[in-house]
Image (cartoon, rainbow, N blue to C red):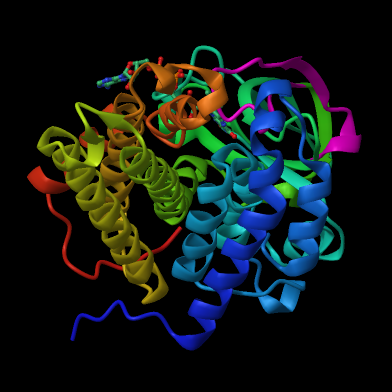
């Protein structure tokens, strides 16, 4: 039977996350966006309440929630502000390769750090010349005695400036393309340099930085998973985290739709509230459909993972559809506000700026379509095993 009825625990968690978004995030979201403020206080409160690191297994001190549970939290927090939510949820991106592939010693040390204190970790895949095509990365990891030496630079790294440790993808075989990539944990105090803080169009309360590894040395056991299996690990990671991005997009769309509904009931033109004009009603109806289907698509993609099943295509469907929908819904919400929508005082413009990044990070809208096309043209066996 197909049933997306939430359990009592999920309903309670959703309520707690919504309450947090309403009381702690929304009141500061627009100021933090204007000033590009790092949300340290919010991170500490969210960590205290268990709204961060939902994915960390109980044996490493985490709440060990399911993928769907975590995504439900992300929708609510993003209704408050998706920039602040990107800061709160990026540990999930950094930790997933570790949870999927690291040895027990590494998991205890590095997942344990995030369970014990409100610390951040960052996922370092992208480079200036290697975005959608990560096989072009130039960062290398070379074995030297009992160490790996990591050399290179990563750009656009979420939480890069504040991370306590980094999950870093580097070439261990320069000639082997994507089959020559491995994954490592690099603690910040190994000599990591924060080079550049990005000034962004949207999600301005999230931190995005260039990170350099100048011949940084880590012990041999800091390899995550098998040598040269890093590309697969990164793709499996994105299968796990894309439902969360789709959930964030759903939260942004919902916030924009609510603002548009409220405004359409207040604003009078031609003697009636603009909500009485069918053209406005149809825009609101399309928003409602997109919010509903975005939510169903991330519920589906997350639930498959929670059942231990492959979700590659569903994850891309959800991320692609919900992110494109968030861009459309927020643009239409500005349209409902007319000229006022373009004025910062009316707040809805922030959502349109924030929505744009959802179509870019964790695989652009085009890359999601490439994944969907590949999985559609060459379908894998249903229930193919999920392995690193
Ligand atoms: C705010 C922000 C936060 C980020 N956080 C992180 C992070 O924490 N960690 C991390 O590793 N990275 C992060 N990224 C990087 C992000 O994932 C990349 O920007 C993204 O994957 C696209 O890479 P690119 O910017 O190099 O674009 P490119 O790959 O150069 O793409 C440019 C355009 O070409 C299109 N394109 C490329 N290849 C194809 C193709 N084969 N077919 C069709 N179209 C194609 C793309 O869709 C895009 O429209 C972040 C980026 C931003 C802006």
Residue farthest front in this picture? 271
Q: Quadrant of residue 192?
A: top right
Q: Quadrant of residue 151?
A: top right
Place of residue 362 in the rendered image (x, y in percent of width and height, measured from the top left): 45, 37
- Image quadrant holding the N terminus, namely bottom left
Place of residue 79 in the rendered image (x, y in percent of width and height, measured from the top left): 51, 49
Answer whether residue 210 is visible to the viewer in this image: no
Q: Which residue is located at x 61 percent, y 50 percent?
A: 89
Place of residue 123 in the rendered image (x, y in percent of width and height, measured from the top left): 62, 39
Up the image or down, 160 lies above or below 48; here it is: above
Place of residue 93 in the rendered image (x, y in percent of width and height, measured from the top left): 58, 48
Q: Is residue 207 toward the left or the right of residue 318 in the image?
A: right
Asked whether residue 192 is drawn in magenta, I would say yes
Residues 338 and 98: in front is: 338
The image quadrant in which ligand 1 is located? top left
Q: Which residues are magenta?
A: 187-212
Residues 369 and 216: in front is: 369
Q: Which residue is located at x 32 percent, y 43 percent?
A: 265
Q: Which residue is located at x 42 percent, y 20 percent?
A: 340
Asked whether residue 307 is drawn in magenta, I would say no
Answer whether residue 281 is visible to the viewer in this image: yes
Up the image or down, 265 lies above or below 331; here it is: below
């Amino acid at each position: 039977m197909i049933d997306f009825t939430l359990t009592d625990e999920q309903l309670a968690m959703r309520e707690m996350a919504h309450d947090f978004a309403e009381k702690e995030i929304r009141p500061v979201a627009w100021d933090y966006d204007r000033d590009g403020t790092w949300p340290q206080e919010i991170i500490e409160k969210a960590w205290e309440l268990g709204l961060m690191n939902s994915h960390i297994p109980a044996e490493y001190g985490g709440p060990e929630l399911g993928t769907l549970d975590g995504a439900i939290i992300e929708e609510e927090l993003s209704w408050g502000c998706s920039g602040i939510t990107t800061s709160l949820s990026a540990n999930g991106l950094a930790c997933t390769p570790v949870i999927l592939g690291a040895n027990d010693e590494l998991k205890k040390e590095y997942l344990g750090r995030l369970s014990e204190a409100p610390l951040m970790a960052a996922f370092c895949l992208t480079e200036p010349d290697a975005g959608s095509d990560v096989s072009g990365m130039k960062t290398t990891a070379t074995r030297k005695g009992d160490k790996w030496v990591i050399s290179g630079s990563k750009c656009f790294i979420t939480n890069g400036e504040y991370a306590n440790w980094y999950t870093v993808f580097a070439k261990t075989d320069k000639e082997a393309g994507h089959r020559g990539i491995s994954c490592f944990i690099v603690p910040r105090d190994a000599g990591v340099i924060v080079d550049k803080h990005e000034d962004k169009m949207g999600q301005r309360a999230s931190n995005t930085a260039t990170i350099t590894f100048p011949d940084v040395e880590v012990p041999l056991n800091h390899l995550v998973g098998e040598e040269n299996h890093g590309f697969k690990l990164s793709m499996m990671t994105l299968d796990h985290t894309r439902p969360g991005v789709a959930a964030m997009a759903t939260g942004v769309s919902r916030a924009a739709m609510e603002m548009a509904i409220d405004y359409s009931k207040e604003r009078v033109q031609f003697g009636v509230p603009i909500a009485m004009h069918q053209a406005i009603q149809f825009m609101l109806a399309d928003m409602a459909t997109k919010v509903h289907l975005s939510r169903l698509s991330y519920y589906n993609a997350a639930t498959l993972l929670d059942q231990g099943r492959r979700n590659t295509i569903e994850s891309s469907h959800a991320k692609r559809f919900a992110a494109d929908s968030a861009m459309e819904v927020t643009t239409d919400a500005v349209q409902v506000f007319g000229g006022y929508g373009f004025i910062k005082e009316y707040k809805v413009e922030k959502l349109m700026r924030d929505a744009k990044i959802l179509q870019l990070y964790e695989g652009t809208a085009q890359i999601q379509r490439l994944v969907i096309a590949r999985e559609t043209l060459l379908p894998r066996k249903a229930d193919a095993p999920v392995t690193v």
